[in-house]
Structure formats: structure tokens, C-alpha cells
Image: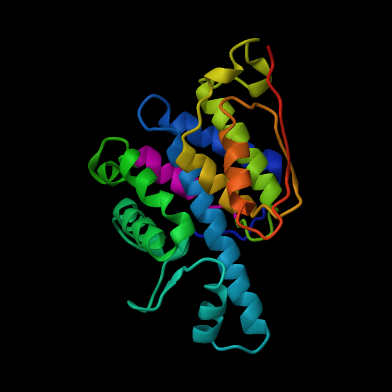
Amino acid sequence: MAKNRNNSPARDELIRALKAGADYIRGGVDYKILLLFLFYKALSDKWLKAVEDYRKEGYSNARAYLLANQDYVLFDEENNKLLTWYEAMKSKETVMELVNTLLRIARLNEKLSDLQILVERLGLRNLQTSDKLKAVNKILDKFNEFNFSRVPYNVIGDVYIWMLNYSVLKGKEPDQIEKGKEGESYTPKEVARLLVQLLEIENGATILNPALGSGIFLIESYNCVRDRDEPELMLYGQVWD
């Protein structure tokens, strides 16, 4: 696997990388695997950045891991193991290591439990022995080129939605979609939940979904804050007819 180049990608650069990834897997692998990799890589990079910041404050590695675990658990205390992207990339059987790592993350993080559903639904474990493994490894190498630790969550979310549209339209640019066809882009609730978790939506935020469809993104956005003392969100959706 390629080594991380500490390159913090701009939106357009990230979109180009995902388009290349979509071309690698076209017709053979579910495009949502790209979104799963994007989510995990971004989560891992931001967690490692938090660890680095705690180290700079004088904390030991062990303590820094535990402090970073307050947001998302990517250090498995029971097994004394890091569950980060780069640790998974060290394995010769990278895809199987990714599967095992994502399943463990799902068990250790209640709010990321949908990872288990996605891993199984996407058939990720079967890719290790399939003829699509070469294409998947190219995608992993592409993600290894970037460091997402300083990429704002709203940029990742924007690219996430762009990728959904691009893949559903079978390679057309989102602005080339035919009038009346926007609703055909169906997003599984598990994907929507992961995106909302990644965005870390705060109470009082304003959320706009420019391709409303079933409204699942807005529903999950509300679910993210509904248990607050005074939940408040401004939710907007656009439907082109």
C-alpha cells in the first residue's frame, strides 16, 4: 500500500480522486464502498490528529489514545490495538483487515453500529478473493495519498453527497441529471447516518439538502439532536420537478 503523503486535499482534488475510484470499480463493486472508505479514512485521520494534539500537551501515548477515544473509540483497550486506517493498511490481506477493524469499531462505538450492516451488505469480505481485488487496492492507494485531518467536515459531507449523485448517474456529472430524475438517487439509511455522524451536527444548525428525495438526511440530522434539552434545527430540502 502507498504511504500517506500528508496531503490535505481541496474539494475539487478529492472529487477527482473519487471519480477515479468510481471508474476503477464501475460495474463490478458497489459504489458505496467508496463512501465507506472515505468515512473511515476521514474518521481515522481526525482521530490521529487529536492524539497528536494531546501528545503536544505532554500526555503519554497511552493517555492520548484514551483522551481521543472520548469522541470515537479507535484504540481497543481490551486488545491493546489501534483501529486506525494505517494500521489496517499494514496487513498483507488488507481488505480482510479492514473488515475486521470496521466490525470492531462498530462494536466499540454505539453511534457507529451501522458500520457492521454496511460491511455485510456491501460484501466487503468477499473482495479479498475476488477478481475485483486489484481495483479495490487501487482505491485504497488513492485514499492513502491524502490526509483528511484538516479537511473541514462540511467539505467531506459535500463530496460525500456529490459522490452519491455521480455514482447513481453512472458517471454523469450531477448537473447533467435529467429533470424529474433526481428522486431516483436512493441513499440507504446506514449511509445517511454515517454522513450525519461525520458532520457532527450541532444543535441550532441550519441543514439544507439540495436533493431531498426521501428526506433521509434531514431525518437523521434531526435524530442527531432530538435528545438535547431543547432540540433546535432549521431543516430545508429542495425537490426539482
Q: Position of residue 147 (x, y in %)?
A: 60, 57
Residue found 53% across the figure and 18% down from its top: 184
Quadrant location of the C terminus? Answer: top right
Q: Is any part of residue 206 visible from this angle?
A: yes
Residue 58 covered by magenta stretch: no
Q: Main secondary structure of the magenta part?
A: helix
Closest to the observer, 20 or 59: 59
Closest to the observer, 142 or 240: 240
183 vs 97, left or right, is right
Residue 137 covered by magenta stretch: yes
Q: Position of residue 94 (x, y in %)?
A: 34, 55
Q: Position of residue 146 (x, y in %)?
A: 59, 53
Closest to the observer, 187 or 97: 187
Q: Position of residue 181 (x, y in %)?
A: 58, 13
Q: Which residues are magenta?
A: 134-146
* Image quadrant in which you'd find residue 217: top right
Residue found 52% across the figure and 84% down from its top: 61
Closest to the observer, 157 or 176: 157
Q: Is any part of residue 2 visible from this angle?
A: no
53 vs 151: above or below = below
* Image quadrant in which you'd find residue 165: top right
Residue found 75% across the figure and 49% down from its top: 205
194 vs 47: above or below = above
231 vs 35, left or right, is right
Residue lying farthest front? 229
